[in-house]
Image (spheres, rainbow, N blue to C red):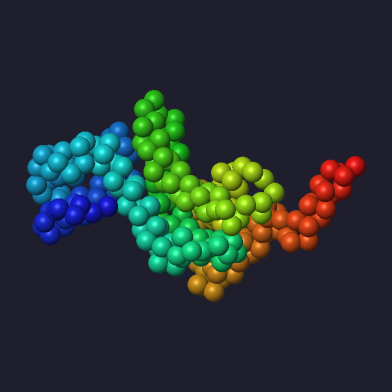
């Protein structure tokens, strides 16, 4: 996230604060992260934090939002969101961008942190992480599924659940291996593309009506109406 009215010097400080804060949050957890330490590394004063982010919660929100923004930038570079209506093409491009995000080492570290903080009394960081990260990304996919051009294509009307299922197809079991064992896939771009294509194919067969199935359902409904 960038502020249009920031001077180049202040924008650079903003970027530095976000970078250092991400490391501190991952290393210490949300509750134990000291904003004063972040300032001591970045320079400036606590008033800089208050001016840019409001408080520590605001800073954490900006850190998470930065990852989502990078994902959105990659998606929008690949897809004309408004014009795209080809479901398979969209899923393939979305899948490639989603894998780049969810299997990023920093994102995995944040996920591991969020799992541990789920058991903390104050779950504010977990709520923020899934509000800004998970829900916005899933919402992006859900909104595409809800396009008028795709009406009637899906076997379920729960587009939110379909979005979750597609993302789970893409990232598992790789996320689990990374979280538990620290093992990240060492695949080439060709292997990654092949994985995405397999996931898209699986989803298209399981969640989406084929043309022949659509015709069969329509015929059955018409016959039932006649009877």
Residue 97: x and y in percent read 46, 62
Nearest the viewer among 97 and 37 is: 97
Looking at the image, residue 98 lies above or below residue 126: below
Q: Residue at x 73, y 60 (%)?
A: 210
Nearest the viewer among 18 and 91 is: 91
Nearest the viewer among 23 and 73 is: 73
Please, which residue is most extreme toward the right here?
A: 227
Which of the image's four quarters has the C terminus?
top right
Residue 198: x and y in percent read 64, 64
Q: Residue at x 31, y 42 (%)?
A: 61
Residue 164: x and y in percent read 56, 47
Residue 24 shows in this picture = no
User: Residue 30 vs residue 117: left or right?
Assistant: left
Quadrant position of residue 88: bottom right
Nearest the viewer among 220 and 94 is: 220
User: Residue 3 vs residue 183: left or right?
Assistant: left
Quadrant position of residue 201: bottom right
**Across the whole image, how many numbered discs are drawn on residues?**
0
Residue 151: x and y in percent read 62, 52
User: Residue 193 vs residue 61: left or right?
Assistant: right
């Amino acid at each position: 996230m960038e502020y249009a009215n920031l001077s180049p010097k202040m924008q650079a400080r903003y970027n530095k604060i976000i970078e250092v804060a991400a490391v501190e949050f991952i290393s210490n957890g949300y509750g134990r992260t000291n904003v004063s330490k972040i300032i001591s590394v970045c320079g400036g004063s606590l008033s800089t934090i208050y001016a840019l982010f409001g408080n520590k919660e605001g800073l954490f929100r900006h850190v998470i939002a930065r990852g989502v923004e990078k994902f959105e930038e990659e998606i929008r570079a690949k897809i004309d969101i408004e014009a795209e209506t080809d479901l398979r093409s969209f899923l393939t491009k979305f899948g490639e961008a989603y894998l780049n995000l969810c299997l990023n080492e920093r994102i995995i570290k944040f996920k591991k942190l969020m799992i541990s903080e789920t058991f903390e009394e104050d779950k504010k960081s977990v709520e923020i992480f899934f509000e800004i990260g998970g829900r916005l990304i899933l919402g992006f996919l859900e909104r595409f599924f809800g396009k008028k051009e795709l009406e009637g294509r899906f076997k379920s009307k729960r587009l939110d659940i379909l979005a979750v299922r597609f993302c789970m197809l893409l990232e598992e079991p790789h996320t689990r291996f990374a979280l538990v064992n620290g093992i990240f896939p060492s695949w080439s771009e060709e292997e990654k593309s092949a994985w995405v294509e397999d996931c898209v194919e699986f989803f298209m067969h399981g969640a989406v009506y084929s043309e022949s199935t659509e015709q069969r359902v329509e015929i059955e409904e018409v016959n039932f109406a006649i009877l």
